[in-house]
Image (cartoon, grey):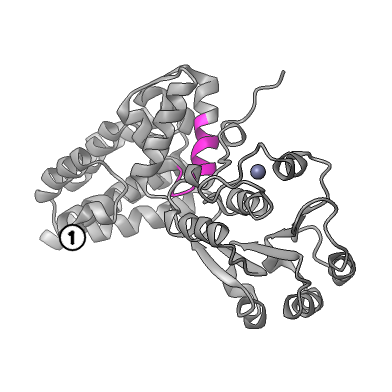
Amino acid sequence: MAKQALYRKYRPSTFEEVVGQEHITRTLANQIKSGEISHAYLFTGSRGTGKTSTARIFAKAINCLNPQNGSPCYNCDACKNLSNPSSVDIIEIDAASNNRVDEIRQLRENVKFSPALAKYKVYIIDEVHMLTDSAFNALLKTLEEPPPHVVFILGTTEVQKLPATIVSRCLEFDFRLVPLETLENLLKKIFEQENISYTNEAIRILASSGEGSVRDMLSIADCCCSYSKNLDENNVLKVLGKSNIDILLNFAKAISEKKIGSCLEQINDVYNSGKNLVVFAREIGELFRELLICKTCNRPQDILTLSIESINKLKIIAEDMIEEELIKYLSIFSEVEMQLKFAISPRVLLENACLEAIAGELKKNE
Ligand SMILES: [Zn+2]
């Protein structure tokens, strides 16, 4: 049997299992408990933050005959019916591929009919901002006078593209990026169930690579698990194609201490190791940004997705660096990252960027 992706395997099935969105799941569970259901919901927010999973849980919960703390019980006839893939009472539409007015007109025809077995017929329309203008108008007519047995859940990553007339008809919930610590705890729990050994540093790198998205984090974790069942920092960095932080720090130090020879040697090492120089330049740019934030902000931990230990380490290194120089390095390496993508001799271009960063300073000191 094909291996099931972690993201699918650990998809939440109750409101309690949805991570990082308690402000939403609690309200929805309360609506189930009190029976005060709206006819149109709008779930907004970045990809991989739980919009579709929450919509599916809610669609089952409003039909469940015996909800448990607001979530579906998965035991009653209604839950069993709706868990059947052939059920016609929860209809999922991907607006990215069904965005024409004809399809929405069809939907308007269909909403008139009562649900086959359930109490409510639920339409989950993902990526709703992809609908055409005329499709929006057709949808609006349905939202203005929804039949009592129909509930709409609209999902979008780009709420600003929705007509205000649609938004104002819906109860809106904004899904937030999932905090780093929540992602870390989720990943630890999953790795323990999957019998994957890990180091805390590996967890930290994977969680921050997810950038607030459970789906993205688990997709990256999947790749790492296929590579090894012992996930330490080095294995994870290898799969991600990222550099060890010590290598990056050495390079940054050589720049700020204006050691041209050391910089060129380090670029040579990176080049010979077969690493992508675009990625390396991006990592160096990111490191200078982190150093600048550690040097200038009172609470760098609020901005950076780094552990307190890493932040303290960066703070000490940043003490010896000059604010204006850090700003210059950040700008030089961000710029060269863009140029490297199209460069014929990326190595020479990166070397030039280092010389510019160092020699520019030498000139100023004369
Ligand atoms: Zn049930």
Q: How many marks?
A: 1
Q: Magenta: predominant secondary structure element?
A: helix
State which region is magenta. 210-221
Quadrant assignment, res 137: bottom right
Quadrant assignment, res 313: top left
Which of these two is toward me, 288 or 147?
147
- Where residue 133 sits in the image (x, y, percent)? 77, 78
**Is residue 234 depicted above or below 17 in this figure?**
above
Whereabouts is ligand 1, in terms of quadrant?
A: top right
**Is residue 198 depicted above or below 25 in this figure?**
above
**Is residue 161 depicted above or below 357 in this figure?**
below
Q: Is residue 7 visible?
A: yes
Find disc 1 in the rendering and name its residue.
297
- Residue type, numbered disc 1: Cys
Quadrant (top left/top right/bottom left/bottom right) for the N terminus: top right
Which of these two is toward me, 20 or 328?
20
Quadrant (top left/top right/bottom left/bottom right) for the C terminus: bottom left
Q: Is residue 43 magenta?
A: no
Mark 1 closeness class: few <14, some 14–19, many ≥20 residues within 10 Å: few
- Where residue 195 sits in the image (x, y, percent)? 46, 17
